């Protein structure tokens, strides 16, 4: 009996911490959310999580048990910041991906609950948590018609951009680390960790960063120019065939689940505001938005800096010492960096961080092994 009581108290403390963490991330998302309707829903979700935590805190006090320390570690701060920067919809998807863990936690807690009242409270919170998972749908359904459209466009524009600059930074770091780790391994195999490794690594870092940056700039600039041309064509169609465009708007709304009469009303209202109608048609028909035009300079800066950061990691030890100690140190920190960057990819992919990190580590080690062996084979030939 005493054992069950201790397990119940431990479970309540864990649930209290989880609710505090959820409330914190919802509030942070609300601060950065531009859409007023979505912001209100996020704040309501945060308030609900606070109410859950207060319920568990009250029960812990009844049992004479202390509240655990709610410490926000550096890792927690970094993860929350990354989630917020990746966009509300992506952050909510990552939160939803942890539902199984939360469900298991509450099922376990219900199994050791000492009273029927406790079990009822746990099941009530479980049901409310399940409702939270339908955030996007509920936000759309409860918002005003124009807000519904804005939320839909906001969500879809985020998906089309692939996770924003956070995603670009992660993939840039991935590319830089992989490229220069291979260079360092190959040259180290050929020179046994001589001064040439540092020179080759720095050259590889610079080349990779400039290549990624210029490539991102040109690709993003071309994408923006195409989008601008498409929107200009859509504007001309609205001027020439306004009735057809209004009907098209109505059909788009209906495909989103808006009732037909309300869809017609919204389309008619928007048709009276040409710029708003253009924004809607461009987004629904073409997947474009003037407000979300990709910025070539942002893309270039993100790609360059993140690639340089990833590329710099393998050469750090060679600034301080050389030979095999530097090779071993480079191998260790590069392997760890491969795992961490692979795990960070889950911010945009939603995969398991352990699996993603392990996959990238295996690929990185395989690349390093191949280039090291090749360097060892051809080094004497070139040197001779």
Image (tube, rainbow, N blue to C red):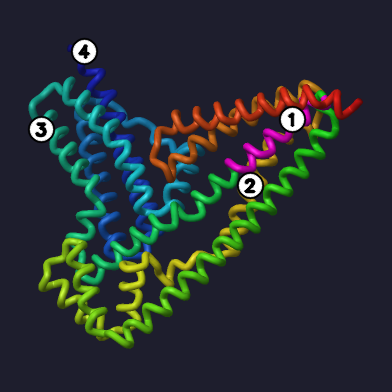
Packing grade of label 4 (10 A; few <14, some 14-19, many >=20) is: few
Q: How many angstroms separate mark 4 from mark 3 (CA)?
A: 21 Å
Q: How many angstroms separate mark 1 from mark 4 (CA)?
A: 61 Å
Q: How many angstroms separate mark 1 from mark 3 (CA)?
A: 63 Å
Q: How many angstroms separate mark 2 from mark 3 (CA)?
A: 52 Å
Q: Nearer the viewer, mark 2 or mark 3?
A: 2
Callout 2 touching callout 3 (CB < 8 Å):
no
> Where in the figure is residue 49, as x and y percent of width and height?
26, 44
Q: Which of marks 2 and 3 is nearer the N terminus?
A: 3
Q: How many angstroms separate mark 2 from mark 1 (CA)?
A: 19 Å
**Residue underneath mark 4:** 2
Q: Nearer the viewer, mark 2 or mark 4?
A: 2
Callout 2 touching callout 4 (CB < 8 Å):
no
**Residue underneath mark 2:** 307
Q: Which of marks 4 and 3 is in front?
A: 3
Q: In terms of secondary structure, where does tag 2 sit? A: helix
Packing grade of label 1 (10 A; few <14, some 14-19, many >=20) is: many
Q: Earlier in the sequence, mark 2 or mark 1?
A: 1
**The stretch drawn in magenta includes residue 141:** no
Q: Which of marks 1 and 4 is nearer the N terminus?
A: 4
**The stretch drawn in magenta includes residue 175:** yes
Numbered circle sitting on residue 186: 1
Q: In terms of secondary structure, where does tag 4 sit? A: helix
Packing grade of label 2 (10 A; few <14, some 14-19, many >=20) is: many
Residues rendered magenta in the picture: 174-191
Quadrant where the C terminus sits is top right
Q: In terms of secondary structure, where does tag 3 sit? A: helix
**Residue underneath mark 3:** 120
Q: In terms of secondary structure, where does tag 1 sit? A: helix
């Amino acid at each position: 009996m005493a054992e069950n009581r201790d397990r119940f108290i431990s479970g309540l403390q864990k649930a209290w911490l989880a609710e505090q963490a959820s409330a914190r991330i919802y509030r942070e998302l609300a601060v950065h959310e531009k859409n007023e309707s979505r912001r209100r829903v996020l704040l309501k979700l945060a308030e609900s999580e606070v109410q859950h935590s207060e319920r568990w805190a009250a029960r812990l006090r009844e049992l004479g048990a202390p509240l655990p320390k709610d410490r926000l570690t550096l890792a927690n701060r970094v993860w929350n910041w990354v989630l917020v920067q990746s966009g509300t919809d992506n952050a909510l998807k990552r939160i939803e991906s942890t539902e199984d863990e939360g469900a298991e936690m509450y099922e376990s807690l219900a199994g050791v609950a000492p009273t029927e009242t406790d079990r009822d409270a746990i099941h009530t919170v479980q049901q409310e948590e399940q409702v939270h998972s339908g955030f996007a749908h509920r936000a759309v359904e409860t918002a005003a018609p124009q807000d519904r459209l804005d939320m839909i466009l906001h969500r879809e524009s985020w998906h089309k951009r692939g996770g924003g600059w956070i995603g670009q930074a992660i993939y840039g770091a991935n590319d830089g680390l992989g490229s220069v780790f291979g260079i360092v391994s190959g040259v180290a195999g050929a020179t046994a960790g001589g001064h040439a490794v540092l020179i080759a690594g720095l050259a590889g870092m610079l080349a990779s960063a400039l290549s990624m940056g210029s490539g991102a700039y040109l690709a993003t600039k071309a994408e923006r120019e195409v989008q601008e041309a498409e929107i200009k064509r859509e504007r001309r169609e609205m001027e020439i065939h306004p009735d057809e465009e209004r009907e098209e708007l109505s059909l788009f709304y209906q495909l989103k689940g808006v009732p037909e009469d309300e869809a017609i009303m919204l389309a008619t209202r928007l048709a009276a505001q040409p710029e708003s109608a253009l924004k809607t048609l461009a987004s629904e028909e073409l997947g474009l938005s003037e407000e979300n035009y990709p910025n070539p300079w942002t893309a270039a800066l993100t790609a360059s800096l993140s690639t340089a950061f990833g590329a710099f990691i393998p050469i750090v030890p060679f600034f301080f010492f050389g030979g095999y100690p530097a090779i071993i140190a480079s191998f260790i920190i590069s392997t760890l960096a491969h795992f961490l960057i692979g795990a960070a990819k889950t911010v945009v992919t939603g995969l398991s961080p352990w699996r993603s990190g392990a996959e990238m580590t295996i690929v990185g080690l395989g690349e390093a092994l191949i280039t090291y062996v090749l360097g060892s084979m051809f080094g004497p030939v070139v040197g001779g």
